[in-house]
Amino acid sequence: MANMLQSNPASSKSTVFSDDEIAHTGKLIIRPMEERDREEIRAVLQYEHKQTIYRNQPFSDWKYDRHVNEVLSKPPRMGCLVAELKGAAIGVAWAGADSYMLSDGPLFVTVYGLAVEMQGLSALRRAKAFVSLVKGVRRWAKSMNASHTFIHVTTGTNLKSTDKLLRAAGA
């Protein structure tokens, strides 16, 4: 199989997750996003959106599709990881790497979105998926030689639980 997630902006041959390195946690798999994930991840994000402080703003399908198309084009400094359980995409984390606006380096990683399916999964399974996605992002950031990883929490709900999960993930 071809490269799955580029890690070196100067080379398209370097990967974070090769076929032999896809992160497995029991039946949970953390892997790069593929076209087949588009609709399942859309549903996860639509539900998540309804829980956030932005719920009064309509979910934008065209904007989601634009972001997914960009992710699937595999730009060297953008990564999108999917948590898969029993063949279904149940979570997503997407991030970008860039340097500070007034500097040429080093890179830092910003997580733009991190969501896990809330319906039909136990709290433990959701937590494992969340923590595994954060660890996957950190692994990707390390492969980019990023100096920092930023995860912005924008849900505005259940902050205590979110903080606990982020601490468990080492963020």
Image (cartoon, helix red, strand yellow):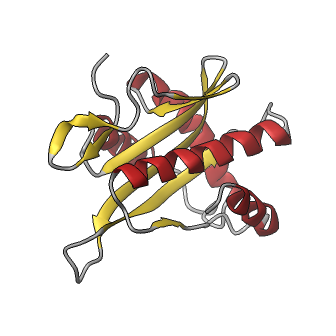
Q: Residue at x 60, y 17 (%)?
A: 87
Within the image, what quadrant is residue 62 found in?
A: top left
Image position of 151 with respect to 131: above or below: below
- Can residue 116 be seen here? no
The quadrant in which the C terminus is found is: bottom right
Residue 30, horizontal then vertical, whole percent:
55, 33
Q: Is residue 105 left or right of residue 126?
A: left
Residue 47, horizontal then vertical, whole percent:
66, 44
Q: Residue at x 41, y 54 (%)?
A: 142
- Can residue 69 be seen here? yes
Q: Is residue 45 left or right of residue 72?
A: right
Image position of 26 with respect to 165: above or below: above
Within the image, what quadrant is residue 51 found in?
A: bottom right
Image position of 159 with respect to 21: above or below: below
Q: In front: 153, or 62?
A: 153
Task: Name the residue furthest bottom.
Answer: 102
Count numbered badges in the picture. Answer: 0
The quadrant in which the N terminus is found is: top left
Residue 86, horizontal then vertical, whole percent:
67, 18
Within the image, what quadrant is residue 141 found in?
A: bottom left
Task: Name the residue furthest left.
Answer: 10
Q: Residue at x 49, y 31 (%)?
A: 31
